Amino acid sequence: MNYQLNWSILWSGQTGGWLLNGLLTTLEISSLAWLLALTLGNVAGALRTAPIPPFRWLASAYVEFFRNVPLLVWMFFWYFGMPPLLPQALQDWLLDHGAEFWAGVCALGVYHGARFSEVIRSGIQSIPKTQFEAAHSTGLTVWQTYRLIIVPIALRLIIPPATNETLNLIKNSSVALTIGVAELTFQTRQIETYTAKAFEALAAGTVVYLVLCLAISTLMAVVERRVAIPGMIAQGNASEF
Amino acid sequence: MDFQVIFNNFRFLILQGFFGFGTFAGGTLRLALPAIVLGFILGTFIGLARLARSRWIHWPARIYVEFFRGVPLVMVIFWFWFIIPALTGKSLPEYAVALTAFVIFEAAYLAEIVRAGIQSVPRGQIEAATATGLSRAQLMRHVVLPQALRNMIPALVTQFIVLLKDTSLASIIGYVDLTKAAQIVNNREIRPFELYLFIALIYWLCSYSMSRYTRRWENRLSPSPS
Amino acid sequence: MKRRFCFWLIVLLCISIADLSRAETTLEKIDKSGTLIIGTRTGSPPFAYVNKNNEWVGFSIDLVEKAILPVLNKKLNKQIKLEKKESAPQTRIPLLQSNAVDLIAETMTDTQSRRDNVDFSLTFFVTGAQFLVKKGGAIKGIQTIAGKRIAAQQGSTNAKIIRERVPSAKLLEFPDQPAAFQALAQGQVQAYTNDGIQLAGLKAKAPKPDDWAGVGEFFSYEPYGIAMRKNDSDFRQAVNVGLMDALASNLYFEIYDKWFGPKGEVPYPLLPETKRFLQMQVVPK
């Protein structure tokens, strides 16, 4: 390969700033979307196990509808399909305040909310029914049972799969570049446009994603160990048998 | 809305884009099906390696999983596309590159599913099998894996649904899957709404029917908790 | 098992290093494989796109097929096949550098910073950036876009120029034309900037072409060239001879007429000064 690698383009001139900006935008869009996804996912996941059928149907409809359509399509939906339905004043405000960013947050959050709810549902379903019965017999209402017993236990059980989903969400945030959000992948392409150094730009992007994701999975592993309920969840790596 | 564009390009979208018959390297199913099967085989080895006693085996497996969970799939495809010709001097066809990248990437995710499936097999089963004098390999093959596989099926199907949509990432190397086929038509005809609605419908039908089917499996297989 | 894996890895590395040291020229590579591999687009009508019959065609592809391929056939004394791979703005230079393709023929603007990394042929098309707006809109050119929301194509040279010349304009960059056009049609942006020829193509394809207008003087100069690996002058010479022969004979203008003539995909008359410039690139035999 007759190619001279030139790593200095990554910190000379504006490129370093772009990468940093891209990382910040990725973090912003991912964390807002993550909060939205967690909220929606919790509600939908809990409702799907609820004893009241209409709630279950509603939550199932949400999950099946949003999870099974590609994120790319949702990006276009929230960016192009949604604004015309809003009042004119709000539309104008949005257009001046990063409509593409908010559309990206909604698309990512609602889509991953549907995926989170599956994680939460399986977490709740893995809790023995006796827990429900015990809670019920101590006189807790359904709402209290969920709030005080089921969800706190389920949240601990689901840390590993939820970490997975979180990483997926961060990586999927790059789809937002299709509606013009200047996130990390967008910025690595921008560097390529300005310097024509594609390998270096992509390597930088890959490394930044990798470091970000490894940091999160390490953090979540620590959290998992900290909040583990003794005797309930296998401690550490249950690798020996 | 004018759905004429769908009718005019129906063959291209479905045959070329979805199934992969046509002049371009492409096809959503043609990539997703082998990728999940081969990825599962590789993932089983990596998942088993993660559970191995020896540190020399379970650490590399762990690094593999953490690494591929941490990089976007599109970057993996990109690197394969350029590193293979740079190393060998020959460029591989798009399909081979896409499949290799998908198998290697998906194996990391599938390894985790396999591991979780194995860990969900009750300990008593293992102890009982050991007591009957089975070797570790026999124990895995005859006792643990069959039960684990059953527990894994819902997660495997979910992963397959994700994979089905992710094939569009291979379009960076010119692989024409359903999404890319729609984009090609869109670039010529400028009909984004109709085309995206159509592909959304196709993806939705596939994924929904599969998740319905597994829900039935799940209900049949899961031991009732009460 | 692991040791054996390491062994094969080392063998593979040795092979690859050995391979790297023996640099093969592009002409040798084409001679050996009998194929010219080009990187081109699937979504840039009329330069390179997939037509209604699902054939991969276009002006840039025609130039390679009708002007450059015959030169290679003659030079290597055999029939060379043409193979197409898709290139995108972020993959085209790596495609060349990794030997995956031999040349890039699409809508790539020849620039100085790109010339640091690849070599370019003669200029085969000349255009410049303009704006597409709703007819009768307020934007008339680059002087009137301050503070406005402007769409551009990701990876294009136009976005770079706007960012430098009118920093107050709010740029939104989309990866493909239809998305940018949709944003314009819905009023998310007030204008869409791209090379004039691309805008003309877009306008011709739009559901109601008369609602749109391409406005403004060219605010950038976009000479399209064929990109090749750096420092391979024999191959570059072959490509340039092909282009020169086509410009000197009538071939180039026939191909131009097929795509940009009155009955072509995108009618776009060739300006007399552009024609002169193109012809003056031809050096004597």
Image (cartoon, rainbow, N blue to C red):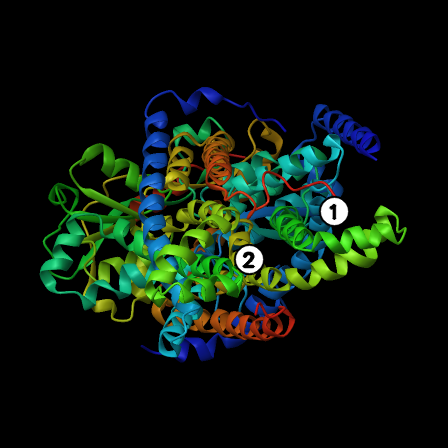
Residue C114: numbered disc:
none
Quadrant location of the N terminus of chain A in the rendered image: top right
Q: For this view, does B68 lie left or right of residue A146?
A: right
The residue lying at 28 percent from left, 55 percent from top is A103
Q: Residues within 10 Å of mark 2 (few under 14, many from 20)?
A: many
Callout 2: SS: helix
In this rendered view, identify the residue nearer to me: C115 or B195: B195
Percent across and percent down for residue B176 are 55, 60
Percent across and percent down for residue C125 are 39, 46
Residue B45: numbered disc:
1
- For the question of whether residue C254 can be seen, the reply is no
Q: Amino acid at mark 2?
A: Thr
Q: Residue C14 appears in which quarter of the rendering?
A: top right
Give the answer, above or below, for where B171 lies relative to C230: below
Q: Amino acid at mark 1?
A: Phe
Q: For this view, does C25 lie left or right of residue C3?
A: left
Callout 1: SS: helix
Q: CA distance from mark 1 to mark 2?
A: 24 Å
Front disc: 1 or 2: 1
Determine which residue is flagged by label 2. Answer: B167
Earlier sequence position, callout 1 versus callout 2:
1
Q: Residue C182 appears in which quarter of the rendering?
A: bottom left
User: Which of the chains bears the disc numbered 2?
Assistant: B
In this rendered view, identify the residue nearer to me: A117 or B86: A117
